[in-house]
Image: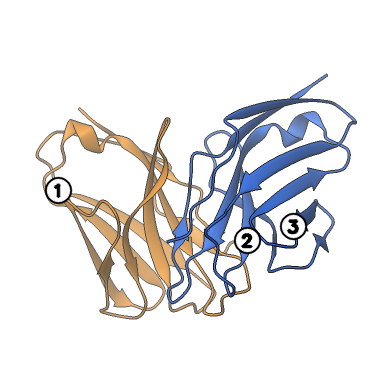
Amino acid sequence: DVKVTQSSRYLVKRTGEKVFLECVQDMDHENMFWYRQDPGLGLRLIYFSYDVKMKEKGDIPEGYSVSREKKERFSLILESASTNQTSMYLCASPPDRANTEAFFGQGTRLTVV
Amino acid sequence: DAKTTQPPSMDCAEGRAANLPCNHSTISGNEYVYWYRQIHSQGPQYIIHGLKNNETNEMASLIITEDRKSSTLILPHATLRDTAVYYCIVRTSGTYKYIFGTGTRLKVLA
């Protein structure tokens, strides 16, 4: 019954590395989102995508980029990882209609050392 | 964008009803109210949503005030497994963006 899958639960990367976080959904949704979650700050939107090859900045896009080459896959890229990007990253796939729920992945806890 | 405010934490005795309030005073007419919860180290889990009528499902009930400026999530018989952070979210009109606040940390006590 898996709907949104994130490629890793835990990652440890070094400062300056290029990091790829992958998210796959099996619901044929057009919408996919990336959030990061930090204590005391809730979930903050990084980037989202309405369709293949389309992307829009969320509230905190600095230091991140995204790629949506296929409908089911949405990748978050940290071009040069920094310690302040240590966080829990959550992928979500909201439905295409406004009155149904979004599904979230299980999260990737990224530590940058 | 409509935003929500929730108390940072609440306690509830096991077996009792948990009533979690949420204010969304700037909500627009076509925006839905959603509730999610997040158990430690997992992704958020959908609970319920509504527009203006009260809603009930197998997990919870949602009571929305007539002016739609606030709502209450009710867990009728809280169990220890309901201990989680509960998020009240308003779906931003014109996009499918979810704006999360910091939520309410509910602790169910034995």
Q: Nearer the viewer, mark 3 or mark 1?
A: 3
Q: Residue B12 or B81: which is nearer the viewer?
A: B12
**Local SS, label 2:** strand
Mark 3 is surrounded, within 10 Å at the Cα level, by few (under 14), some (14 to 19) or many (20 or more) other residues, namely: few
Which residue is at 82% across, 32% downward?
Answer: B79
On the image, numbered disc 3 is attached to which residue? B65
**Local SS, label 1:** loop
Tell me if residue A96 comes above or below residue A87 in the rendering.
Answer: below
Are tags 3 and 1 found on a single chain?
Answer: no
The answer, for residue A110, to whether it is visible in the render is: no
> What chain is the orange one?
A
Instruction: Provide residue B76's location: percent of width, then percent of height.
Output: 87, 42
Which residue is at 68% across, 69% downward?
Answer: B51
Q: Looking at the rendering, which quadrant does residue B64 occupy?
A: bottom right
On the image, numbered disc 1 is attached to which residue? A18
Q: Which mark is residue B33?
A: 2
Mark 3 vs mark 1, CA separation in Å = 48 Å
Tell me the kind of residue under disc 3.
Answer: Thr
Tell me the kind of residue under disc 1.
Answer: Lys
Instruction: Provide residue B77's location: percent of width, then percent of height.
Output: 88, 38
Mark 3 vs mark 2, CA separation in Å = 11 Å
Mark 2 is surrounded, within 10 Å at the Cα level, by few (under 14), some (14 to 19) or many (20 or more) other residues, namely: many
The reply to whether dot 1 and dot 2 touch (C-beta < 8 Å) is: no
